[in-house]
Image (cartoon, grey):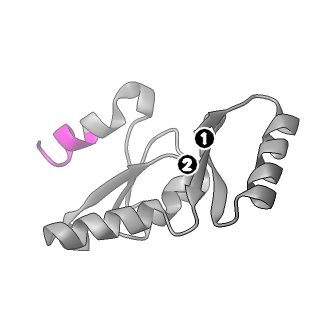
Amino acid sequence: MVYEDDAKRLEQYHGFIRAEEPGLFCESTGYGLLGTFHEGVSKKWAVEAILAYMGIGRSDAYVFGDYENDLSMFAAVDNRIAMGNAIDSLKSQATCVTDTNNRDGVARYLEEVLGI
């Protein structure tokens, strides 16, 4: 993870990764953070691997997200919950929108909707 306010410096970092580290890619994770990952890695891949290992069906899993890096994860399950502060493209893919991160949206969903 990299945090940098200066757009020029972030582009330099992107350029370095593209030129010097084949097989890696950069993805914005929101709030000024930039993640660098192996090209075969995604949140979708991780969720699908965990579900398969644990024998959990996609209709029995829930994912929560707020930024474009969560879109791949949303494709892995049927229950896709966007945070109230999520970007519009994620909200449009969500099955439900809960409260914001700052207002404990995940906890509220778990308690109020799932009764956990």
**50 over 9 or under it: above or below:** below
Mark 1 vs 2, N-terminal side: 1
Amino acid beneath label 1: Gly
Residue situated in front as seen by the camera: 20 or 36:
20
Amino acid beneath label 2: Tyr
Question: From this viewpoint, which residue is outermost toward the right?
Answer: 8
Mark 1 touching mark 2, by CB under 8 A?
yes
In the rendered image, which quarter is residue 75 located in? bottom left
Q: Residues within 10 Å of mark 2 (few under 14, many from 20)?
A: many
- Element assignment for label 2: loop
- State the quadrant of the C terminus: top left
Residue situated in front as seen by the camera: 106 or 17:
17
Is residue 66 in the magenta section? no
**69 over 11 or under it: above or below:** below
Numbered circle sitting on residue 30: 1
Please tell me which residue is depicted at 34% across the width and 29% down the height of the picture.
104
Please tell me which residue is depicted at 37% across the width and 43% down the height of the picture.
98
**93 over 110 or under it: above or below:** below
Q: Where is residue 106 in the image (x, y as percent from the top left)?
A: 31, 39
Q: Where is residue 7 in the image (x, y as percent from the top left)?
A: 83, 37
**14 over 73 or under it: above or below:** above
- State the quadrant of the N terminus: top right
**Can you see residue 100?**
yes
- Element assignment for label 1: strand
Please tell me which residue is depicted at 74% across the width and 53% down the height of the picture.
17
Question: From this viewpoint, which residue is outermost toward the front?
Answer: 20
Q: Position of residue 85 (x, y in %)?
A: 52, 38
Q: Give the residue at mark 2.
A: 67
Q: Report the magenta residues as a range.
A: 109-116
Q: Where is residue 73 in the image (x, y as percent from the top left)?
A: 43, 62
Marks 1/2: CA–CA distance: 6 Å
Residue 73 as seen in the image, left or right of residue 27:
left
